[in-house]
Image (cartoon, rainbow, N blue to C red):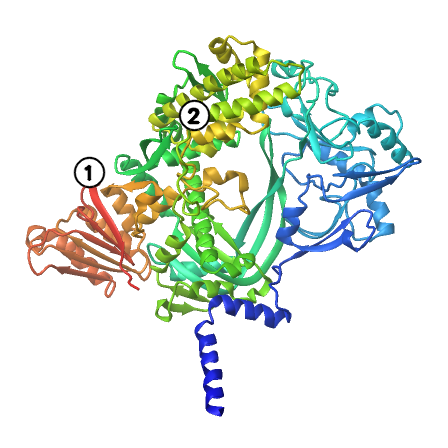
Amino acid sequence: MEGVSFMTNYSRKKKYVENYTPSRRVIDVVHEITGISALITPILHEIKYVKWPPIDEEDVQQLDFDTFFARFPPFEPISIFESIYKGRKRTIRLKGDHVWFVLPIKELKKNNRDNLKKIFEEFENYLHEEYSDEVKCEEIICGVYEDFGNKIILNEVIIPRVVYDGGNPLYKEVVFKLTDWEPELRVYYGLHKVAQKINRHPRSKIPEILEEALASHEAKRGYSPYALNYITTCYDGYVISTDPTAPNQICDPCMEGKTKETLLCRKYPGRGKFEYRRKIFPKVYSVKSIEPSSLVYREIEKVYTLPYSILLADNVEISKDIEGFVIYFDKVGKVELNLEKKISTGYFSTNSLMIAFDSKLVRIFIDALKENKANMLIKVKIGPRKEEVSLPLYSVLVSKYLWYKVFNRELEPNVGVDEQHNQLVIRSFNGKSDIYEFHDMEKFIEEFVEKSESESENLERFVREVIAHTLAHVVYVGSTRHLPEVENYVDYFYSTKGGYIVSGIFENTKGGMLRASKEITDEFTQDQDIARSSGYFRILNQRILEKIIESGILKPYEDASAEPETRDVEEEMKRIAMVITDKIASKSSQKDTKELFNKVYITLKEFYALLLNTVSNIVRSKLYIDSQLFIYTILWRLVRDPSIVVSYLKKKTDMDDKEIEVILEELFEAELYKILVEMLFPDMCVDGCGLDLHLPDCHRHFEQPFIISRSLLIAFLEFLGIRLNNISDYNVKINRIDCPGSLLEKLSLLGRKNVYILTSELSENTVNLIRNLLQRDGLIVVLEVDRRLMESKPDLIEELKSLQEQHSGRLELKSTQEPHHGKMLDLDNLRIYTSWNFGTSVKPLQTYKAELKTEI
């Protein structure tokens, strides 16, 4: 019996050991530290918040840095907080009354910034008496924080009421300056329309004022008059109010002066009057940057080899900073608020898995894409018939850069309709240039990028961002798919500053107590894959990246049951038309819905045809676009200004302007346009989407369609010798890669430790390149030449032998045993098979095939 018992216990123990996976180790570490059988929240820099005035313990909480800014960002009315005002007859409960502000923002008007400080001076003094004398209402309104030059360490936020706290009771006003060609963006928090109707509104009378002003709006359908987290707009979206009484009221005094602004003052909803609809205040997203300490870059400099290095780091210092905030308003578009002082966690010690590339590789890669427009392609499907078009990957790069500048208001296209060809055209950018039909766009882009040195540099910075950010997403997705238990404890980071592109993941806890990066690495490595160690840094086998990449780059529709079926355009149009017909009929006295349905259907059909022609011509002109880029750059302009297409649709449908405007308004309001977009772009994930690489917690949320590119990352990795299986599954087709000798020269000068050259020809430039290589400290160069060159090029051979004597032990000159026509470059761990004789002709295109020398 004892033997049986012993064997039973042993077999259980053995089974436990066999199943003791990284997942179990992470959970056990958490249990050991916390003493509980539940996963803890990330232990990072914590921020205390106080909902003012605090009534119970729920109003005073501590949240970690990320969670606080996700749940309670500045400038966004907090819907889950309730403020209570006890009047004579009833108690008024307001939601969205609590908002906090950050003032060191470049776009915030200086006089408005000064005014907000002044408004909250009295409140600051009040808090000193009632709460803490450490509270300040200066950079942060209001909080406890430390100011370190260009950074703020935020410890506590006291979140005030906009209706009651501070000066200007009932409302607070914030004014942003966006661009030179746009009006100021003015946001009224609270009840500014109510305040305008009352000569004096002392704080003691606020409950009675709320009773009188809001109670009469209770019966109105569609929204609560006690919710201040909803907005209505006028002046084409540039004046925003949370006041529930504002809809259909006249806007504030008309902005005089410019013709455009005067036109906005026409007294109908959305222009000179507030819209009658209210929408929820849009989410405010934080823009994060995560920066390793300078020690990381010094360590990379010591160990880096081509084409990249992978490091597992313990005890690495990382800082997480908020650089700004982004709000996306329907009419105005993206509003970017850049902080003059970052809000930071300060540096904290943790662990990290990181990949480092020499930044100079990006410039070489861009030039290689340009030389291989016919060889390096992406497949794009358009229209309900899924017509497939192949575009150069270089077009993806420059097109995304162009659309990105449009999205960021650096380029402002004037969009119109070419009625002859039934398509949209760009008439000008920033009020300059002639009409650009889309078949001219490739020429425009080349001129735009190549004729300006600054634009060329900006394009290179953009590509660095794309490669670094996409790779960071890929590593994060691949890691958390293999080890889901660590998802709540890791975050991704990337940096493009200095001489290296660094991307990876890190443990999102102080001290890195869970060793999450090591657990993730164990999923992809074995002991022999750790090449060597340097202090707290372990250098890993470069081929590990192939495993991580293949885990992280999901195939399109991998998470879906199947590729979306081809849609019947007629049926979809009828379905959308029916929904819009019902919406319009419910708001009017019109009883004959059959006639209304026909009008809606015809309008939608013509509108869709216009969009389809536009998308087809964009793609055929070698300009890349996908569903998200289309929504954010072209379709958004039609949402903002339907008049662009109204006159065109009027001629096509024989309907009047107002009828067409109402139909389009309902189409956009109910977001039914998304169905049209899905029919325009049947492959919604052609270059990355929410099903694979787009993350809900991306550090630059709205910019993902522009700066995340699966196809460009795949091409970059292929250029560096990383072979991914079945890249055609990702819409990428690389027939071959050709490079001019000039690019191969630049690439050869990036070797760090060892350079091996096999060539069957020599020139004076060959000798000069060898001299340049030897200027790098510690670099060992082996030059193997065709034996016939020893006799045919004696002068050059003598120069090389002289260099060999000068650099003893660092340059080895040798010849092949037999006549040899081979050409090859080994640059550290990057092997390149090529037709190029080292240092000879620089202009003709040469064959190029790269592979990693390292093995697993």
**Relative image position of residue 81 (x, y in whole percent):** 75, 44
Q: Amino acid at mark 2?
A: Val
**Horizontally, is 224 left or right of 691 in the view?**
right
Residue located 30% across and 64% down the image: 856
Q: Determine whether the residue tagged by mark 2 lies in a helix, strand or loop.
A: helix
**Relative image position of residue 411 (x, y in whole percent):** 49, 27
Q: Is residue 286 above or below residue 493?
A: above
Classify residue 561 by image quadrant.
top left
Q: Amino acid at mark 1?
A: Pro
Which residue is situated farthest in the bottom direction here?
Answer: 2
Q: Is residue 8 visible?
A: yes
Residue located 61% across and 23% down the image: 583
Q: Crowding at label 2, few (<14), some or many (≥20) Cα neighbours within 10 Å? A: some
Q: Is residue 498 visible?
A: no
Q: Nearer the viewer, residue 253 or 193?
A: 193
Classify residue 45 by image quadrant.
bottom right
Q: Is residue 835 above or below residue 411?
A: below
Closer to viewer: mark 2 or mark 1: 2
Q: Which residue is mark 1?
A: 844
Q: Nearer the viewer, residue 551 or 103?
A: 551
Q: Nearer the viewer, residue 531 or 471?
A: 471
Task: Tell me whether circle 2 and circle 1 mark residues in contact (CB < 8 Å).
Answer: no
**Horizontally, is 460 left or right of 722 in the view?**
right
Q: Crowding at label 1, few (<14), some or many (≥20) Cα neighbours within 10 Å? A: few
Sequence-earlier tag: 2 or 1 = 2
Q: Is residue 138 above or below residue 677?
A: below
Q: CA distance from mark 2 to mark 1?
A: 49 Å
Q: Determine whether the residue tagged by mark 1 lies in a helix, strand or loop.
A: loop
Residue located 59% across and 50% down the image: 321
Residue located 43% across and 74% down the image: 18
**Relative image position of residue 139 (x, y in whole percent):** 71, 44
Q: Which residue is mark 2?
A: 569
